[in-house]
Image (cartoon, helix red, strand yellow):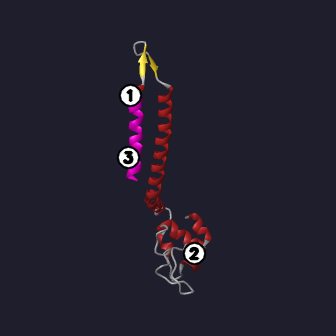
Amino acid sequence: MNKLKDFSSIVGLLMNCIFLFFARRKHHYREPDIDEWVLDAIEILGWVQGSSSLVLIFFFIVNRKQLIVKKGWRDYIRANESVYDESCLNNEEQLKVHQMSYEQTHLILMLRGPESPDFNMKRNEDEEGKKSGRSFGNFFTYLEY
């Protein structure tokens, strides 16, 4: 990633050097006198630098996506604490998440978020005895996520 950033910086430096050394002015510096090849080179290098910058931004977003999503969920849960009542999450029957109703899984998602231990089925074995990953219990709660 650093090499791509260095490449983009070098391309920008090359564009500036080409313009600085090959662009001239005439009529007492009132009008630019730039050769056609200089304009073409700067345009091509500009596209190369723009493309490399977009690739850098794309990979930055991909790498930081998980952090951004988790921060968004923390803020969302904090806002929901005043709207929903925590006492409605009592699981007196000790139901697993796939046995709960949509309303129960919805409230867990709204109050505890997708990282809730209720959704992490790795701690609990399912009916076949297999250990599985995160499960929201039903399709509707998964869509809300």
Mark 1 packing: few (<14 Cα in 10 Å), some, or many (20+)? few
Q: Residue at x 51, y 70 (%)?
A: 108
* Mark 2–mark 1 distance (CA, rounded to whole Å): 64 Å
Q: What residue is disc 1 on?
A: 20
Q: Is residue 120 above or below residue 11?
A: below
User: Residue visible at 41% across and 26% down?
Assistant: 22
Mark 3 — residue?
Answer: 6
Is 43 a magenta residue? no
Q: Indicate the position of residue 137 as horizontal and vertical percent values.
A: 57, 75
* Marks 2/3: CA–CA distance: 47 Å
Task: Report if residue 6 lies within the magenta region.
Answer: yes
Is residue 115 or residue 10 the one in the foreground?
Answer: 10
In contact (CB < 8 Å): disc 2 and disc 1: no
* Residue position for label 2: 137
Q: Earlier in the sequence, mark 2 or mark 3?
A: 3
The three-letter amino acid code for the residue at tag 1 is Leu
Chain part drawn in magenta: 1-20
Q: Main secondary structure of the magenta part?
A: helix
Sequence-wise first label, 1 or 3:
3
Quadrant of the rendered structure where residue 8 is? top left
